[in-house]
Image (spheres, helix red, strand yellow):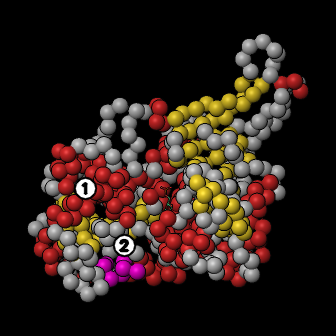
Amino acid sequence: MAVRVIEVADFDLVVFGASGDLAHRKLIPALYHRCCDGQLPEDARIICSSRRAYTDEEYRDWAREALGEHVGELEEARINRFLSRLRYVAIDIGSGDGWDGLKELLDERPEVVRAFYLAVGPDLFGTICESIGANGLVTEKTRVVIEKPIGKDGKSAKALNDTVGAVFDEDQIFRIDHYLGKETVQNLMALRFANALFEPLWNAAHIDHVQITVAESLGTGGRAGYYDTAGALRDMVQNHILQLLCLVAMEPPESMDADSVRDEKLKVLKALAPIHEGDVDKLTVRGQYRAGASAGGAVPGYLEELGRDDSTTETFVALKAEIANWRWAGVPFYLRTGKRLAQRVSEIVVQFRPIPHSIFDEEAGTISANRLIIRLQPDEGVQMKVMIKDPGPGGMRLRQVPLDMSFAEAFKVRNPDAYERLIMDVIRGNQTLFMRRDEVDAAWAWIDPILEAWANSKEAPRGYTAGTWGPSASIALVERDGRTWAEDGL
Ligand code: BG6
């Protein structure tokens, strides 16, 4: 299938933190792919900046290595074409040295779209934004991109958003949640709103419950320092998982326009029933991995990896959420995420209610309720579990089979990384897939009381062996309601 490329206007993209991990793993490879697909205008420039004293050539060598590691199959001519777009400016954010060089470069083309990507820790957002403002670098076509974590609670998120908001208007601020750029996440919107089939059934009358699982087999990698200050609830639930929940639960927006979509997501976040301190033990489970086997070998526990034995940071969380509105009242949304789990898999499972009455006799077997599985990764796809008659003679015996749609098989195209789409959306000025400030606030408003209750609790997170599905209490969380975590997968 041919790749369709949407043209974007000429731009200067400035990446702060350009010698960091995100640039290495995601940003440089994403921009390279966009370049290869012909989406970057002829004169578009990628201006990379960090504290290190690289020359353009030295930075290009660094970028070449990043491509070698994360892209594979490289063609020399294509790489050179891409690398020739890269410029490097050393800036020491602390001392303020180096801004003149950036200003000089940017002033060459004040008329083009200008995007500042802050691939740095949030502690630097304020200083960078202030310097961008003080150096007169904000033009009408300027945007700024910030990465999570956006705060560690509602209060710090407000302070951070105020700092960025002092220099940029809300419609210039692009808060990335890379889950929104994933192909299947957008497919969720296509599935719901481009098919007549699902929407009439998409409510408490027909849906029994929803499960959202984002399981990782890896541990905290080289990010233990950050992770220990965050934990699974802040790292994954406050943003990615709540955003997925919003897309499953929101009302049909008026259009795909950014504010229409974000207005509907906001309503869902506001309708989340608060989890009060007294209910935290019943509705949440937090865990921390112990040594075990994962990703094909023996692995140490979280505390060993961290080199401390007093951390109570959770590496796993399971929650039972309720959305208190007409569409969803009484339908639990079971959410779980964790590191060092049995398998890397992210999926949304929509469990429909059983048929109201069976006309079949006992020999037909059990009639399982329909289940829609939307798999985000790996092997993106959608599957609908339906009952059919077992083929051949032998009477009317029924069984459940999957109506399967694997995207990799159906569309023989490379599945673009979320960052490819999101960076291009920034250039195009399309905020549909980015979080608005009030969404961030509403998400924290639901998360904060859980964090407080955990902080007040004397209990430590429950241990689970690396390579399993988390603490047994998370299984009990669902089984108490007479349900089970779906493990049939795609
Ligand atoms: C990041 C989290 O936002 O998402 C990481 O900080 C996590 O801890 C990552 O590993 C997962 O992203 P993906 O795209 O690999 O599912």
Name the residue that disc number 2 marks. Answer: 120
Q: Is mark 1 within 8 Å of ligand 1?
A: no
Q: Quadrant of the N terminus?
A: top left
What's under tag 2, amino acid-wise? Val
Name the residue that disc number 1 marks. Answer: 64
Q: Residue at x 69, y 45 (%)?
A: 487
Q: Nearer the viewer, mark 1 or mark 2?
A: 1
Are the two marked residues, 1 and 2, in contact with CB atoms closer than 8 angstroms? no
Q: Residue at x 72, y 69 (%)?
A: 462
What's under tag 1, amino acid-wise? Arg
Q: Can residue 144 be seen in this view?
A: no
Say if 168 sits above or below 328 in the image.
below
- Between 461 and 8, the residue placed more toward the observer is 461
Q: Is residue 124 magenta?
A: yes
Say if 490 sits above or below 237 in the image.
above
Q: Range of the magenta residues?
A: 123-129
Horizontal side, residue 126 vs residue 223: left or right: left
Q: Residue at x 58, y 54 (%)?
A: 297
Horizontal side, residue 275 vs residue 35: left or right: right
State the image quarter where residue 230 is shown: bottom right
> Which residue in the rendered view is the most extreme toward the bottom?
95
User: Residue 47 placed where, x, y %?
Assistant: 21, 65
Q: Which residue is drawn at 22% across and 60% down?
A: 61
Q: How crowded is mark 1: few (under 14 residues within 10 Å), some or many (20 or more)?
A: some
